Amino acid sequence: MVRKSFILAMTMVLLTLVNSRAIGDWQSFPVCDLPDEQTDPSVSGVRVVWTDNRTGGYDIYSYDLAEPNEYPVYTAGGDQEKPAISNDIIVWTDDNNIFGYDLHDSVTFTVCGDDAEQECPAISGNIVVYLDKRNYTENGFDIYGCDISDKLNPNEFQICTEEHSQYYPDISGDVVVWMDVRNGNPDVYGYNLTDEQELEICLNTSGQYYPKVSGDMVVWLDDRDGHSNIYGYRISTHTEFPICTHSDGVGNPVISGNLVVWQDTRNGDTNSDIYGYDISSGSGSEFAVCTASGDQINPSIDGDTVVWQYSTGSSADIYCAYRPVPSVLTIISPDGGEMLQAGTTADISWQSSGPVIDTVRLEYSVDNGGNWDIITPGTANTGLYDWGPIPAENSDQCLIRISDVGDSGAGDVSDGVFTIFECSELLIADINGDCFVDMEDFALFCQQWLQGGNPYDSD
């Protein structure tokens, strides 16, 4: 009965959110919306962690999206802040040191307990990276790492101890990135833990801030155009590219795979929203994650799951959204190479997947997509349409285009060109009208041998 009540409550929340969110937003839901302050979320797989002050101090809480179920991770005295998670391991800053918790074994352990200050932990697998001030007496930090494969005997190591300060480390696999001011302005540097080589990610004379890494890709905040931009870099090809350069007021970019998300004030300085960008979609495809009223800040992403902090201060909550499964339309035929005779009929066939599409539009082109003519403005999405009579055209540059009449954006075009042709009027021996003279025509000819066509002459 409790579970049914929970499901009903969640359904009502989701319906409320659907009604309040903007068209095109991902469907979001609360992970934790208690009256107290919840901040700085991080997500890995089905687990979300955040900083929570419901008990008066700052503690670490977690939520399992699969169950769903919330549980405290660490609620000891003092303040535990800035958690990060990778698989079953959570790390955080606690009294200027780095601590961790293994969700699988229910074990708390020390990552770094040095007397100096440590901050901003990030984790990937069994490697934790963080800022460390043991070599400085003022505001400078170095980048250190720790292998926690053996949690009772963690193996700490230096990553970057350049004379000038390093900030905001992040890690993915064997690549660590950070912000570095050794050149007099903030740049992005990296380090490959496997070959122990330092990487120069971006040394533009402007400022680069808050780098994040996922696999082969690095993203950061960049002010080279006089306002905040987001840029990316592919390590394997040493290729830099812009991600968002048209919205003044972006911040906190994060990346997972080919998806980048960030907070964005394009809709008003007092209304920060979450936007994203798909690097894999050719020239790139930007999308809105959440543009609801109020502030959405501090996003975190893993795979197709995005979490963020809604609002600030005592009203700050944690929200989540999954990337929508896209509707897909795929043309099966004609898809390239076919020969279709004008005046006859032919099947247009296609497949659809994902959320249901009710009605599709069909069009054809005879100039390889330069211009399009309507076949039907709307037909049921059955996967088959009887196209006929095929228009009187002569072209070997024909294409079919299908699209969703609704707003899903799904569509497809024939992979290759096909041919529409009119049969030559000179082919007078084509008795059956198939635009080919063969034995079938000869058989019809034989059937009518010595038959007259004059109904008034019986002979």
Image (cartoon, rainbow, N blue to C red):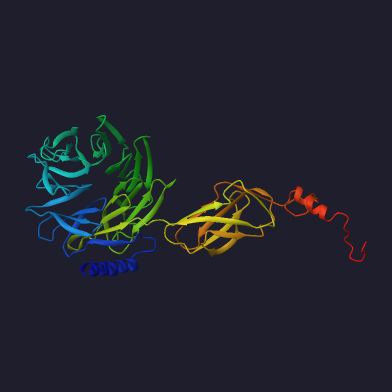
Which residue sits at x=30%, y=53%?
305
Which of these two is toward me, 356 or 128?
356
Q: Is residue 437 visible?
A: no
Q: Between 375 and 285, which is closer to the camera in this rendering?
A: 375
Which quarter of the image is occupied by the C terminus?
bottom right
Which quadrant would residue 321 be assigned to in this image?
bottom left
Counting from the top left corner in percent of width and height, residue 232 is at 35, 42
Residue 339: give x, y in percent of width and height: 65, 49
Residue 456, percent from left and from top: 92, 66
Q: Position of residue 373 (x, y in %)?
A: 61, 58
- Residue 269 seen by the camera: yes
How many numbered marks are there?
A: 0
Rendered residue at 30%/64% (across/down) = 293
Quadrant where the image shows the N terminus: bottom left
Horizontal side, residue 199 vs residue 50: left or right: right
Give above or below for 419 relative to 359. above
Seen at 29% across and 50% down, the residue is 301
Eyeballing the image, is 60 above or below 36?
Answer: above
> From the viewer's perspective, is 309 left or right of 275?
left
Q: Give 256 or 276, whichever is nearer the viewer.
A: 256
Q: Quadrant of residue 239?
A: top left
Q: Is residue 191 above or below residue 448?
A: above
